[in-house]
Image (spheres, grey):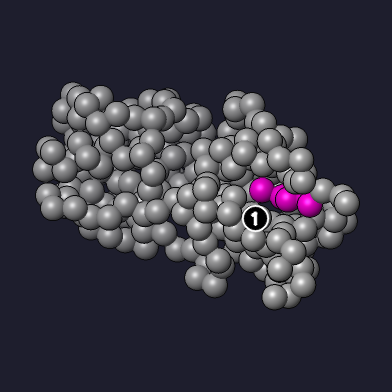
Amino acid sequence: MGKHRILILAGTTEARQLATALAERTDYDSLLSLAGRTAEPMAQPVPVRSGGFGGSDGLADFLTTEKFDLLIDATHPFAARISHNAAIAAGRTGIPLFALRRAEWKQEPGDRWTSVRSVPEAALALGTAPNRVFLAIGRQEAFHFESAPQHSYLIRSVDPVTPRLDIPHALYILATGPFEEAAERQLLIENRIEVIVAKNSGGTATHGKIAAARALGIPVIMVERQQPADVRTVETVKDALGLVDHLFSPEMKRGV
């Protein structure tokens, strides 16, 4: 009996953990797909392809041509375009799809959040009065804050923001998580940060800034997720492995 072929749309720690677990199995053949936006991606435990597919049609063609049996969306919670394309491609091909998506952060006592639906809304929510802003949303959408040049920005990303923003006051730092709360608190104090802009990515690796903001009473403009609502979702690698086994179980094959 041949191996079941699984395409994992990656970009998160959970994707790597899932691929590592599947690599230890003899009944699965996994391929990890990376968007190719990170200059130096980590080594992966299974074969990797890099780059886009050419939209939902290209992804659907790839799934059928390469004879995949399952598609797992383990991309970043804010990789909305590829998640949307994955849902369309799965629908067109009939190939099962589920998402591995870490749980969102929940507001706790002491948090001062303003929730918005998008990064442009976050830029607007900063208001007109100048503030010292910690911009912790990555580099892809940082350009939206050129619409609010009155603020002073501390901008952190894994890879450089290129081109740099056309604003008068910006300090750029390159860093890769995890970020501990104590270090985040020191960063906020040293840079006299008055407001944080963050995405509700969930997980522990970048939660330190949220806990630090709570401790210091700093407001956070939180960009909330906008993901396809009709895609089956699990929140942990353990649950993802269980669902993979369930989907390929004899009962499922018989339609029980």
243 to the left or right of 251: left
Q: Amino acid at mark 1?
A: Val
Q: Position of residue 41 (x, y in %)?
A: 60, 29
Secondary structure category for the residue under label 1: helix
2 to the left or right of 81: right
Query: As rendered, which of 86 and 127 lies closer to the eye?
Result: 86
Kindly give the residue lying farthest to the bottom in the view shown.
256
Query: As rendered, which of 171 and 137 lies closer to the eye?
Result: 137
Q: Position of residue 110 (x, y in %)?
A: 12, 49
**Residue 87 visible within the image:** yes
Q: Compared with residue 23, is residue 40 higher up or lower down, i.e. above or below?
A: above
Q: Compared with residue 148, is residue 161 higher up or lower down, i.e. above or below?
A: above
Q: Compared with residue 81, is residue 135 higher up or lower down, i.e. above or below?
A: above
Residue found 58% across the figure and 33% down from its top:
38
Q: How many marks?
A: 1
Q: Which residues are magenta?
A: 4-8
Q: Position of residue 162 (x, y in %)?
A: 51, 33
Q: Quadrant of residue 130?
A: top left
Residue found 66% across the figure and 48% down from its top:
8
Q: Position of residue 189 (x, y in %)?
A: 16, 28
Name the residue carrying label 1: 244
Query: As rendered, which of 113 and 255 lies closer to the eye?
Result: 255
230 to the left or right of 85: left
Residue found 72% across the figure and 50% down from its top:
7
Q: Compared with residue 76, is residue 252 higher up or lower down, i.e. above or below?
A: below
Residue found 20% across the figure and 36% down from its top:
212
Quarter of the image with the C terminus is bottom right
Dominant SS in magenta? strand
114 to the left or right of 48: left
Is 35 a magenta residue? no
Q: Residues within 10 Å of mark 1 (few under 14, many from 20)?
A: some
